[in-house]
Image (cartoon, helix red, strand yellow):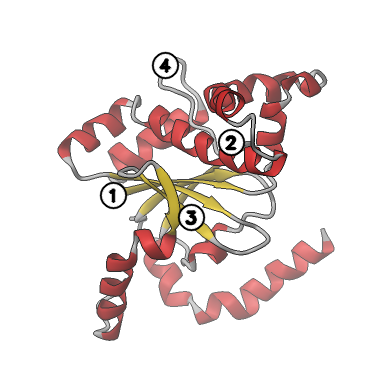
Amino acid sequence: MPKFAAGVVRFQQHVFPEKQELFERLSKGQSPEALFITCSDSRIETAMITQTDPGELFICRNAGNIVPPHTDNTGGMTASIEFAVAALRIPHIVICGHTQCGAMTGAMDPGGLEHLPHVRKWLGYAEAAVAIVKDQGDTLTPEAQMRMLLEQNVILQLRHLETHPSVAVRLARGDLRLHGWVYDIEKGTVDAYDAASGAFRTVTDIYAAEVAQYATTCEHGDHR
């Protein structure tokens, strides 16, 4: 805790004064560009990966970056998704998995979670992704199987998202986009799901045109 307390002091004395205009603007409300759903793993630093400031991402984190399919049972993920999509009207949702994910390791071997009953039940929402890997990944190495699971889990959770009424309405209107990412902790790379091909490709490939347009906008000083 002393390290964290010292960090708060540095924030108050140095970071906040440098960004005071930003925080004054944020104090009047929020208008994030994306709902970012990722794992609770402490190694995932969303602002560092995306190079964003406070106020740009509405973040939900849980073990395995999971989105339960919509039901009448209210939960934290369901309420947060509804608020982000229907109230904040965010235009993008990103589900971001990551390498070395303990949750996905547990999902592959639920028998090893006997002492963690709530974790085991929660990871049941990844069961369909596990089934795909076990059906199709017999010839793959354990490392390749895990990579396949990370990707299949992201795809599965994107499908779960579509069952949420607020998301379904916005998708039907055409003013909401869903994105699936996998972040490699060791390499620092991010691959994105290409629905057209059903494969994951580098963020550079998937968003090349949009990144170029954003760079041009920045040059003219029109970016957020």
Element on which disc 4 rests: loop
The residue beneath circle 1 is 91
Depth check: give the residue in front, 132 or 90. 132
| Residue on which disc 4 sits | 71
Label 3: how many Cα within 10 Å (few below 14, some 14–19, many 20+): many
Residue 180 occupies which quadrant of the picture? top left
Residue type of the residue flagged with mark 3: Asp
Q: Residue at x 41, y 60 (%)?
A: 56
205 vs 154: above or below: below
Q: Is residue 177 left or right of residue 77?
A: left
Q: How many marks?
A: 4
Side of 30 relative to 118 (left or right): left
> Percent position (x, y) of residue 63?
63, 36
For the point 47% across and 67% down, which residue is it?
Answer: 53
Q: Earlier in the sequence, mark 2 or mark 4?
A: 4
* Name of the residue lying farthest toward the left: 173
The residue carrying pointer 2 sits among few (fewer than 14), some (14 to 19) or many (20 or more) residues within 10 Å by Cα, namely: many
Q: CA distance from mark 2 to mark 3?
A: 14 Å
- In primary-sequence order, the first of circles 1 and 3 is 1
Q: Viewer-nearest of labels 4 and 3?
A: 3
Q: Name which residue type carries label 1.
A: Pro
- Local SS, label 1: loop
The x and y percentages for residue 6 are 76, 70
Rendered image: mark on residue 191: 3
